[in-house]
């Protein structure tokens, strides 16, 4: 026990101790955290669908049809027609052969990576990939080589000197920096070196692409270019769970081999039906995406003018770089004192010296909400602009 206690104390001293806020009521954009009303700028509900009345109604109806629980894993007796329907809808929506549901994005990455690569294989992973990708790589027992963030030339050189089965894995939109992976160039280099490309589009799905199909569609790429696409449903899709979309043969393989698919209870079927409803809302969400973009663009202009240091992101993930852990916590607390919830992100989620506030926007925010954030930021304005850091590594 003593070791654990002293490590916890060290974390507190370093400003790295994590706390959970207890939230009540509907969660976006205004919420109650620890009994206090706050306007939130840290959810991943990018399209504001988590509280959409049609989705809630769809879930109510679905619950009376399917019951509450998932009952069993998919391969025992848990694969409900509701799951099948959502998988078919997701495959069609993303323009892919088939899709397979997972209970969370974390489990999807763990399952897919550890199924598609093993001992003797090599996985090439972007330096800023999400923790679930990092953990999936470890679980696979393959050799893991991290390439510098978004650096396709370095990746190409690493691929050229490696024989055998190669997997390249990247976030579509990087969760802590908000930038988009160079997918066109990645697809090309993977083709040249016979590597299988896996894209985790947790933060692009619903937000990017002509109809919200995600970052792969944003680049006009297809299943031939990016054979394996992971998408999550707990962010822009407003529900919970995840999917993998891929050619039929890979899907068949994943059903046989992905342990986080095989050995876990299926998501509640009612949730699958409610997600089908939200998929329609994503497809029809052009105005929401336009509004989201206008909030993001305005924030970037005005926060930069206030002297804040931002990252080169055009997505709803807009980190304010601070650097020091305690200063980041202090800024988060100062914003909270003005009624705003913007969580501080510190190491090990980001590298040492790169603590930040991860501001995220949702189509549920109004421009008046943004006014409030900008006014509070003007009040807490840094004396001197903090220089933007070059890179970050592990992700929340
Ligand atoms: N991938 C990325 C890039 C993420 O940011 C996250 C969640 N933060 C996940 C996967 C995990 O998704 P889920 O929350 O559905 O487990």
Image (cartoon, helix red, strand yellow):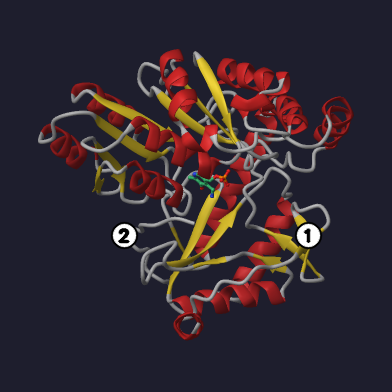
Relative to 285, 380 lies left or right: left
Q: Residue furthest front?
A: 76
Separation of marks 2 and 1 at Cα, in angstroms: 33 Å
- Of the pair 330 and 241, the residue shown nearer to us: 241
Give the image location of residue 54, x and y in percent. Answer: 84, 31
What residue did someone put label 1 on? 31
Give the image location of residue 358, x and y in percent. Answer: 54, 59
Q: Residue furthest left?
A: 161
Relative to 122, 251 lies left or right: right
189 above or below 372?
above
387 above or below 232?
below
At numbered mark 1, what does the secondary structure look like: helix, strand or loop?
strand
Q: Is ligand 1 within 8 Å of the beta carbon of the residue shown at mark 2?
A: no
- Of the pair 220 and 12, the residue shown nearer to us: 12
Earlier along the polypeptide chain: callout 2 or callout 1? Answer: 1
What residue did someone put label 2 on? 390
Give the image location of residue 357, x and y in percent. Answer: 53, 65
Give the image location of residue 375, x and y in percent. Answer: 67, 67
The quadrant in which residue 212 appears is top right
């Amino acid at each position: 026990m003593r070791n654990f206690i002293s490590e916890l104390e060290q974390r507190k001293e370093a400003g790295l101790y994590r706390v959970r806020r207890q939230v009540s009521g509907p969660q976006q954009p205004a919420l109650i955290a620890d009994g206090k009303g706050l306007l939130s700028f840290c959810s991943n509900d990018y399209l504001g669908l988590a509280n959409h009345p049609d989705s809630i109604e769809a879930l109510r109806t679905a619950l009376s049809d399917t019951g509450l629980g998932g009952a069993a894993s998919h391969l025992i007796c848990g694969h409900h027609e509701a799951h099948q329907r959502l998988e078919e809808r997701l495959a069609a929506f993303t323009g892919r052969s088939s899709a397979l549901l997972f209970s969370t994005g974390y489990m999807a990455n763990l399952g897919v990576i550890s199924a598609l690569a093993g001992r003797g294989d090599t996985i090439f992973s972007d330096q800023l990939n999400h923790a679930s990708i990092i953990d999936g790589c470890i679980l696979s027992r393959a050799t893991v080589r991290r390439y510098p963030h978004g650096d396709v030339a370095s990746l190409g050189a690493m691929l050229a000197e490696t024989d055998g089965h190669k997997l390249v894995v990247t976030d579509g939109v990087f969760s802590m920096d908000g930038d988009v992976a160079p997918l066109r160039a990645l697809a090309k280099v993977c083709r040249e070196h016979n590597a299988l490309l896996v894209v985790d589009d947790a933060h692009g799905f619903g937000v990017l692409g002509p109809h919200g199909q995600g970052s792969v569609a944003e680049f006009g790429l297809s299943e031939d270019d990016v054979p394996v696409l992971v998408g999550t449903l707990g962010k822009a899709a407003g529900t919970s769970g995840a999917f993998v979309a891929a050619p039929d043969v890979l899907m068949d393989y994943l059903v046989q081999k992905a342990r986080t698919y095989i050995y876990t209870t299926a998501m509640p079927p009612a949730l699958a039906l409610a997600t089908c409803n939200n998929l329609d809302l994503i497809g029809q969400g052009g105005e929401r995406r336009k509004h989201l973009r206008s909030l993001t663009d305005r924030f970037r202009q005005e926060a930069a003018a206030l002297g804040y240091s931002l990252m080169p992101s055009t997505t709803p993930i807009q980190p304010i770089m601070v650097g020091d852990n305690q200063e980041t916590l202090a800024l988060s607390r100062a914003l909270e004192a003005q009624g705003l919830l913007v969580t501080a992100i510190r190491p090990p989620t980001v590298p040492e010296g790169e603590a930040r506030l991860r501001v995220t926007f949702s189509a549920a925010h109004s421009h008046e909400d943004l006014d409030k954030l900008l006014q509070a930021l003007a009040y807490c304005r840094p004396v001197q602009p903090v220089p933007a850091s070059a890179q970050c590594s592990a992700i929340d």
